């Protein structure tokens, strides 16, 4: 999956209208009928089909055939384009620079904002990990109301941004969050190496206790990182202090598997320190000691510092989190299954796509289309963009 920043300058207003129409149509259709795209985009001089072909050629949308109708789906390329266009209009992204990381489910780029400051762009790419087999994938997709990876990637970005902001505001060592749109987040660039690349530290014991204290401090505030390991801890060049990143799997201490996640985080650090630095300590925190303080069974001493509650109230609700959890559980199974393989992302021009027949046989009513057209016009004309994506 390449991020093609050049396309942003190359595509004109008609392309933007058609791409936005495809995105809007995706809310109700897994495969957006060509007819609906044309209805929504309403290009002045017609010619939608030429624009559609052009977008498909550039892999911003992909043609999908099913037995009911022909249509298109937005690709990650198209989604990147729409997000970058929004971010560049807001001035938070001016130019896109080199890629500095390819995670399991993300791409990380250095970008510059309008003031030429370097910051980090993280693009979430859920769906990159392969399912064990097609059946498993189909089962998973069938059980979801909305089957879009793009939707899940957007949820992951919203979650990551909400947690990063909350943690940053409460003085935790995390990058400063800057902006978020669709599946993208922007954050401060940290001058650091991930712990996995650090061979030597001045004071191993101090780093170990800093990390354990960080796990406990999070937990006392009601949060567990859930992937607290040498890949998600950056060690600053300046003073070798740890900065925590990568929050989409964060859980509340009230989560039913909280203790397991907590212990897994603690054990990751213990195992790494033993392997890398030969450092073993008898001291490590337990979940029981690290839970938020209670004055009686189930009665919290003070609610105000419960960050899990604060994030819930900030808009990234427990309901949204549970949608993502469902997907996370599959990922966790993957991790524990030694045989899982990480694949290159699927070819975006691939026509093979699980299609939800119920969706196909349930076209939009006239009124729905009218409403969508109105919303589309508002989005494109008033703001130039669909802000709420
Ligand atoms: P993933 O979810 O794919 O694991 P991460 O958020 O962990 O993605 O980032 C992957 C890598 O990108 C990190 O290990 C780190 O090297 C680099 N990185 C991510 N965020 C930053 C940042 N704010 N500053 C510097 N490097 C970063
Ligand atoms: Mg990571």
Image (spheres, rainbow, N blue to C red):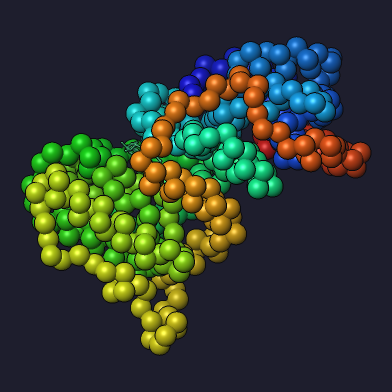
Nearer-the-camera pick, 134 or 306: 134
Q: Is residue 43 left or right of residue 156?
A: right
Q: Determine the residue positioned at 10% across, 46% down.
A: 277
**Which x, y percent locates residue 226?**
38, 54
Is residue 292 depicted above or below 174 in this figure?
A: below
Which residue shows up at 10% across the image and 53% down it?
279
Locate residue 204, reporting x and y percent: 10, 51
Choose between 322 and 8: the one closer to the eye: 322
Side (left or right) of 27 relative to 120: right
Q: Is residue 243 above or below residue 14?
A: below
Residue drawn at 44 percent across, 73 percent down: 304
Relative image position of residue 240 (x, y in whole percent) = 17, 46
Q: Looking at the figure, which quarter contains the C terminus?
A: top right
Q: Is residue 136 above or below residue 55?
A: below
Furthest residue in direction right, as rendered: 366
Q: Is residue 297 visible?
A: yes
The tally of labels here is 0
Could you tell me residue 97's position as x and y percent?
40, 23
Quarter holding ligand 1? top left
On the image, which quarter does residue 76 sit in? Answer: top right
Whether residue 170 is visible to the viewer of this picture, yes or no, is no
């Amino acid at each position: 999956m390449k991020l093609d920043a050049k396309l942003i300058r190359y595509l004109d207003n008609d392309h933007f209208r058609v791409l936005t129409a495809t995105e809007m149509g995706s809310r109700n259709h897994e495969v957006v009928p060509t007819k609906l795209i044309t209805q929504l985009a309403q290009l002045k001089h017609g010619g939608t089909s030429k624009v559609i072909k052009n977008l498909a050629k550039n892999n911003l949308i992909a043609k999908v055939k099913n037995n009911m109708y022909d249509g298109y789906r937005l690709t990650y390329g198209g989604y990147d384009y729409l997000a970058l266009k929004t971010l560049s209009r807001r001035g938070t992204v001016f130019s896109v620079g080199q890629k500095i990381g390819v995670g399991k489910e993300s791409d990380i780029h250095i970008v510059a904002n309008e003031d030429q400051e370097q910051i980090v762009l993280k693009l979430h790419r859920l769906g990159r990990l392969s399912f064990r087999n097609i059946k498993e994938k189909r089962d998973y997709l069938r059980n979801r109301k909305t089957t879009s990876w793009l939707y899940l990637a957007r949820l992951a970005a919203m979650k990551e941004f909400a947690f990063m902001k909350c943690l940053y505001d409460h003085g935790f060592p995390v990058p400063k969050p800057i902006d978020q749109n669709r599946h993208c987040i922007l954050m401060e660039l940290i001058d650091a190496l991930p712990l996995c690349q650090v061979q030597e530290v001045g004071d191993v014991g101090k780093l170990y206790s800093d990390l354990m204290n960080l796990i406990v401090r999070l937990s006392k505030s009601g949060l567990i990182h859930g992937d607290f390991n040498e890949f998600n801890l950056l060690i600053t060049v300046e003073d070798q202090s740890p900065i925590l990143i990568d929050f989409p799997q964060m859980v509340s201490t009230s989560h039913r598997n909280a203790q397991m996640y907590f212990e897994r985080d603690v054990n990751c650090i213990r195992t790494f320190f033993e392997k890398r630095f030969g450092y073993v300590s008898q001291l490590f925190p337990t979940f029981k000691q690290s839970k938020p303080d209670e004055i009686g069974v189930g009665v919290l001493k003070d609610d105000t510092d419960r960050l899990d509650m604060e994030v819930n109230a900030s808009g990234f609700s427990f309901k949204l989190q549970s949608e993502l959890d469902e997907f996370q559980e599959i990922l966790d199974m993957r991790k524990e299954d030694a045989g899982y393989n990480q694949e290159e992302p699927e070819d975006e021009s691939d026509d093979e796509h699980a299609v939800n027949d119920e969706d196909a046989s349930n076209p939009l009513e006239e009124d729905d289309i009218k409403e969508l057209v109105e919303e589309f016009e508002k989005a494109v004309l008033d703001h130039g963009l669909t802000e709420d994506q």
